[in-house]
Image (cartoon, helix red, strand yellow):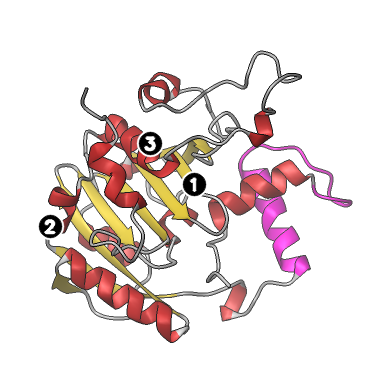
Amino acid sequence: MRDPLAPFRWLEASPADECGLLGEIFCVSLVRRLDPAEVLSRLDPVSPAETMTFAEVCGRARACFEEAGDVRYVGVAQIGQWSVAVEPWGGQAALSTMTPWPARAGEVVGVGRNDYARHRFAYAVDGTVVTAFDPAEPERRWGDDPDRLNRLMREAGLEVEPPADESGGEPWHGRVTEHPVARAFALAAGITGVALTWTAVSGLPFAGAALRHERGRGGRRATGLDRSADIRRWAEAHGLTMSERGRIAATVAEQAEDLRDPPGRPG
C-alpha cells in the first residue's frame, strides 16, 4: 500500500540527512495570489533579493543561524497561484504575521516545525486566522472557525476530536500524533493543491533575502509589560473578552504567542 505521507517525510529529516537542509526549526508559508516579490517585501527584508536555489537559501539561513546574529534568511518561490516562503533554521516570520497579509491574498497556510518546543499549523483567510493548532495535538484548535478543515485533517491522519473517554487509557493531553510535521504538510497540500515534495522544492528558483530577526520591540527582548499589552491587543482584535487588569488566561496567552512570537534559538 502506498504511504500517503511519503512525499512529505523529507520535511521531518534530521539536518544530518541529505534532505535535512531546513534544520530542526523552520517555517514554510503558502500565500495565495501574491507574487514572490510582494511576499518578500512584506517580510521587510534588509538585503536585496537574489535569485538562488533551494539549497542556497538553506545554506544562507544556516550561516545566519550559526553566527547567532540578528539576521535570518528567507526564500520565496512561485507554484501556480501560490507563493511559497521558506524560512529555514529558526525563522517563522511569515507564520507569526499571518493577519497583516492583505485581504486580496485570499488564503495563507503556514506550517512550522520546532523540535525544541511545539510545531505549528495555521490557516488564515482574508487576514483572519480560521484555525490553528499544534500538529502533534490537533484536537486542541482555536481560531474563527476551528472545525472548517476537519475533513481534510482526517484525510491527513490528524485527529479532530479528543477520545470519547478521557478517564481511561492515555489522557488527551498525553496523546501525541505520529509524524505531525509530515501530516501538517499533507493537510497543506489538501488545502492548496501544492504538494511540497523534495523534487518539487529542490528544483525551484527562489528569491532570497535576509530578514531582521527582532525579539520584542526595537530589537530588544520584550518585557513582561510589553508582552501583556501585545497579548491584550491580539485578544481584542480576535474578539476575545478580557478584563483590562488582572491575570491573562493561560489559554489566551498560548493562542496569542503561538501565532505571534517566533521561537528563539534552541539551547
What residue lies at 57% left-to-right and 33% top-to-bottom?
141
- The percent position of residue 248, horizontal first and vertical second, equals 80, 49
Residue visible at 40% across and 44% down in the picture: 181
Q: Which mark is residue 120?
A: 1
Q: CA distance from mark 3 to mark 2?
A: 23 Å
Residue visible at 46% across and 42% down in the picture: 122
Query: Which of label 3 and label 2 is nearer to you?
Result: 3
The quadrant the C terminus occupies is bottom right
For marks 3 and 1 on the same chain, the one whose residue lies earlier in the sequence: 1
Q: In this figure, which residue is indicated by the disc labeled 2?
A: 204
- Which amino acid type is shown beneath numbered disc 1? Arg
Quadrant of the frame with the N terminus: top left
**Left or right for 74, reference 238:** left
Q: Nearer the viewer, residue 192 or 3?
A: 3
Q: Residue at the top extreme? A: 164
The stretch in magenta equals 224-248
